[in-house]
Amino acid sequence: MNADAALPFPAVPAVPAATVVAPRETSFTPPPPVDLPPGPVARLELLLRDPDGFLSGLDRATASPDGGVVIASLTRTLLGAVVVGAGLFGSVIGAHRGGLQVLYCTVKVPLILLITLVVCAAPFVAFARAARLPLGAREVVALALASCARFALVLLGLAPFVWLMEGWSLGYHRVILAVVGVCVVAGTGAGRLLFSGLARSGPSGTRVGLAFVAVFALVGAQTSWILRPFVVRPRTEQVPFVRSLEGDFLGALGTTTRSAMDPRIDIPSAPLVRTVRSAPSAADVPCEGSSCD
Amino acid sequence: MTITASLAPPPTAQLPLSRSLALGLAGAVAFGAAAGLGHGAAAILRGAWMSPALFVGGALLALPPLYLASSWSGSRSSAEELVSGVADVLGRTGVILLGLSAPAAFFSATLRTPSAWALLLAAVVSVGAAAVRSVSVRALSEGLAAAWIWSAFAVALGVRLLVALAHHLPLTVTR
């Protein structure tokens, strides 16, 4: 991009003013560096709509003399976005059961992102250091936090879709798949910001980004597993804040996928016993296994 | 890009040999201990010696064949330069392992299924493979065949070490 800026503009022949159309040279020049807008809402809007502009603003903020103050203020904004965005998405998930579960999920969904971010901060910095990316710890964490905030904002935007799925009474397993699908979409949006930010730092940025995503996805899946239940079957009588440690996320996801494909099959993840029901009905046996979340 | 210019960049030069070795050792010890954290003191101790045995021991064992492969492929790197390069990669691997200690401790404390084995194995294999590739690209860039042969040997060596250490693995799956 800097090389582009050094290119001379092509000579434009003089034409009558009436025939002048939109200036074409804008397509040859890099976008001007953007400062982060002052307000939190404008910053989040920039984060959501223009990731490259946001990263450019982040560059300028870190380069400026008062960069520390701007980064601190941006961090508060991003944390707020994670808490509010993921919290509201959690409340929609909790609405599947209703009652106290709405509050539980409002607390637990932001916790998933924040715990995952805390656990992953050290490996993120280590990957960047080992790959010799010219990024300090503060910048790596800011980039990861911004990606989490983008993830939470996309979740918030797609929360009505989950609510719609719940309203259609598509069943417990399909609602879970809808939630997982929404998370995949949000993850794609967050990944775009992460990869753009790392790719700007050097050719090994993409590989580092892949390592980031792999670690974050694994830790995030495990965090969500230990903080379950989120979607609870209506017939479950007592809903705890968290369940005891048993099973793992991938096993439960496989169970849920198989159950969503064939509603006659209910496969509790532990113990591994297959129960084939005669027909799908609301009078199924109460769910006791860890796949009931 | 301005981000590269604005952020206090970490040094890109090679670390001194002793520091690289210390970093590799510390990272491996921290990762091994963290992987055993959820399974008691004995598992922590086992992990703390097995992980360096795997990573540092593997690097030491793969070094002589690397020198042979390097000289046969026409490289003019001296033995000292090769050792220095391997130590640098070991140091970077130690940094990665140090960073992965936090997730390792997290999974060790919260994941109690056979998936924990698979996850630990995947992490060790991925980090080891990245280290082998890094050494290969660095030291054997002039001979593709030598690079492949040495990489295959290093991977086989890693597998052999893993198998030898397998019955000491720090994880005991409790269901």
Image (tube, grey):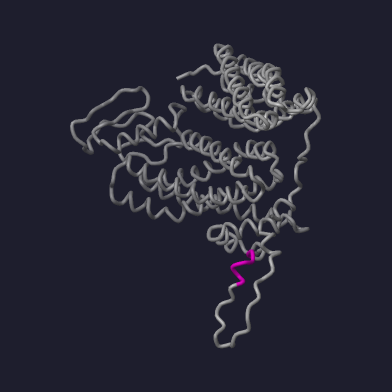
A101 in magenta: no
Quadrant in the picture for residue A172: top left
The residue under the point 30% across, 35% down is A259
Where are the magenta residues, as a range? A25-31
Residue A266, position as x, y percentages in the image: 29, 31
Tell me if residue A26 is in the magenta stretch.
yes
Question: Which residue shows up at 55% across the image and 36% down it?
Answer: A215
In this rendering, would B51 be left or right of A176? Answer: right
**In screen coordinates, is A17 left or right of A161?**
right
Q: Quadrant of the C terminus of chain A?
A: top left
- Relative height, residue A227 to residue A11 (above, below): above
Q: Is residue A262 left or right of residue A114?
A: left
Whole-percent x, y for residue A81 in the image: 55, 54
Q: Does residue A20 appear left or right of residue A253 in this picture?
A: right
- Residue A253 in percent (x, y) is at 39, 35
Residue A105 quadrant: top left
Asked where in the image residue B147 lies, by quadrant, the reply is top right
Count of picture labels: 0
